[in-house]
Structures are given as C-alpha cells and as structure tokens.
C-alpha cells in the first residue's frame, strides 16, 4: 500500500491538494494533449493522446489491465467500458482513489476498481496483467528502474506495457541547474516533486529487464500547445481555480507553464511515448 508522506511536494500530498483545480484546467482526460492540428481543442487533443496509448496497448476483451498512477480514473473507466477489460487503477493518492471509485460507480462499472498502492512496490501478484498502462505518472517516481521492474514483474508473458510522460531530452549540467534553480523550484511548487528521464533511458532499462521495445517516439512538438490551452482554461475558470488553490497556486501554475514551454522549445524537456512486450 502507499505510505503517507508529510512533504507537501510529495506526489500523493500534492495531488490531493490540486486535483480538483487541475480537472478544470486540464479537462476530463487530465493529461497533456496531442495537438494535430496545433489549434485543435484541448479535449480533442487529450483524446488523441489517449488514442496513441490505445493503439500501442491493443487492449482486447477480457484483458486484465493495470493503470499505474490512475489519476481521476477516467482512462481506467473508459478501458473497462469500451473494451470489456478488467481494470485495476492504483495511485498513492487517497483522494484519487476516492474520486476514481465514485466515477466508476456513477458509470455502473464493476470491472474498474481502484486501490491506494505504490507503483514501485505494488504488492500485486506476478504475471497478473495483460496490459500495464503508465500515463504521466512515471515522472513522479524517483526510482524509474524500480517502477519499470515492478511493471515487468506483474505483466504476464506476451503482455504489453505502454508508457507516456514528460522526458528529459538532454543531460543538464550542474551549473545550469544552479542558474535555473528558480525555474526548477517553481515547477516543484506547481507540479510536485518530479524527476524526468531520457526516453532512451526508459528503453535501455526495459530491454535490460527482458522486454522487447516495439515503439519509442518523441512527441514533444505535438504536445507543446498543451501549455497555452491550460492557460486558457485558467482564464476561463479563474474564480473557481483561485478558490481551490489560492492566488499563489494560480500564479505558480501559470508561470510554470511558461517555464515548461521554454524548456520544450530549447530541447531541455519534452514528451515521449513507448511500448514494449514481455517475451514468452
């Protein structure tokens, strides 16, 4: 089970604080968008990113799916409803489990369940899932190898792993980290304690764990318009968002999108998607 952490920037505590505001800002899908064309509405773009995951996951009727870092539970519920899959969503956030469980109940989905567990040490059975789905949660886990090792452990032979997330696109030397420390501190306040990995780093680790990587793609460019879309939603829902996270929370979130936008444009950070299969 997930353990409590009193650090306000720890993933569970941070998520518990911001998730209601982020639903207004990020929309029902609650993640980045894949904007093709670049001026697509946010809802369409987030649905497009979900489709990118679905294309690689190849979920079939009756599949057992583990959603690691399940957020609001929207994707887990959609997988259960659309594909007849049996889905378990896990998160370290108690409010996330509560919200996702309520969503599944509202939609009458008995095949979607949610539990408070740690994605790096879930306590779930070996070979228990046909698909492991990791959507924008890996950057919140310091030990990427522990996460991927756990994903491989619970994945059945011939099972599929799909992952998409913010990535680090280059090594950042210490002097640059020092010079940009205010930007990194701002990102931590707005988004919690995040640690980005190189896309090649994920690939190398998965291959080392015995998986066959079938896709590894940098999709930074089509995700770039996400930040402007989020700022537009802050403007649209400003009063409600301020009531939820306060003036400082709104300021930090908006400013952090400008920082991320700059990092995207100078190839410091970006966004990647990958898929892998577990050998028989």
Image (spheres, rainbow, N blue to C red):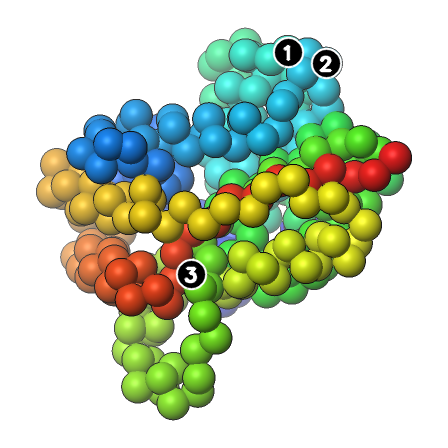
- Label pair 3/1, CB-CB below 8 angstroms: no
Q: Earlier in the sequence, mark 1 or mark 2?
A: 2
Q: Quadrant of residue 240?
A: top left
Disc 3: which residue: 192
Residue 62 is tagged as 2
Q: Earlier in the sequence, mark 3 or mark 1?
A: 1
For marks 3 and 1, give the CA distance: 34 Å
Instruction: Pinpoint residue 32: horizontal percent, then vertical percent.
Output: 36, 41
Q: Residue furthest bottom?
A: 175
User: How many C-alpha atoms fall within 10 Å of the one at disc 3: few (<14), some, or many (≥20)?
Assistant: many
**Image location of residue 95, percent across then percent down:** 49, 40
Q: CA distance from mark 1 to mark 2?
A: 6 Å
- Is 203 in front, or is 226? 203
Q: Which mark is residue 168?
A: none
Measure the C-alpha gap from mark 3 to mark 2: 35 Å
In depth, the one of 68 and 46 nearer the eye is 46
| Mark number, residue 84 | 1
Q: Earlier in the sequence, mark 3 or mark 2?
A: 2
Q: Residue at x 36, y 84 (%)?
A: 176
The answer to whether the residue labelled 1 contacts the one labelled 2, judged by CB atoms less than 8 Å apart, is yes
Disc 2 crowd, CA 10 A, few/some/many (<14, 14-19, 20+) = some
Residue 113 visible, this orientation: no
* Res. 116 in view: yes
The answer to which image quadrant residue 110 occupies is top right
């Amino acid at each position: 089970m997930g353990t409590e952490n009193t650090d306000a920037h720890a993933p569970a505590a941070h998520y518990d604080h911001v998730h209601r505001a982020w639903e207004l800002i990020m929309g029902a899908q609650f993640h980045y968008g894949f904007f093709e064309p670049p001026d697509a509405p946010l809802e369409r773009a987030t649905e497009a990113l979900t489709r990118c995951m679905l294309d690689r996951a190849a979920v079939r009727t009756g599949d057992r799916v583990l959603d690691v870092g399940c957020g609001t539970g929207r994707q887990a519920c959609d997988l259960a409803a659309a594909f007849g899959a049996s889905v378990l969503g896990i998160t370290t956030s108690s409010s996330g489990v509560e919200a996702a469980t309520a969503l599944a109940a509202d939609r009458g989905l008995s095949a979607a369940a949610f539990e408070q567990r740690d994605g790096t040490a879930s306590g779930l059975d070996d070979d228990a899932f046909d698909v492991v789905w990791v959507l924008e949660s890996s950057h919140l886990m310091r030990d990427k190898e522990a996460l991927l090792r756990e994903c491989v452990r619970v994945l059945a032979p011939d099972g599929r792993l799909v992952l998409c997330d913010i990535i680090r696109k280059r090594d950042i030397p210490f002097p640059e980290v020092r010079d940009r420390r205010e930007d990194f501190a701002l990102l931590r306040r707005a988004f919690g304690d995040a640690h980005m990995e190189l896309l090649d780093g994920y690939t190398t680790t998965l291959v080392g764990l015995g998986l066959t990587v079938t896709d590894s793609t940098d999709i930074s460019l089509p995700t770039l318009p996400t930040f402007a879309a989020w700022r537009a939603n802050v403007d649209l829902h400003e009063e409600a968002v301020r009531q939820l996270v306060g003036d400082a929370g709104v300021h930090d979130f908006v400013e952090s999108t400008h920082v991320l936008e700059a990092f995207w444009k100078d190839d410091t950070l970006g966004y990647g998607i990958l898929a892998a299969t577990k050998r028989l």
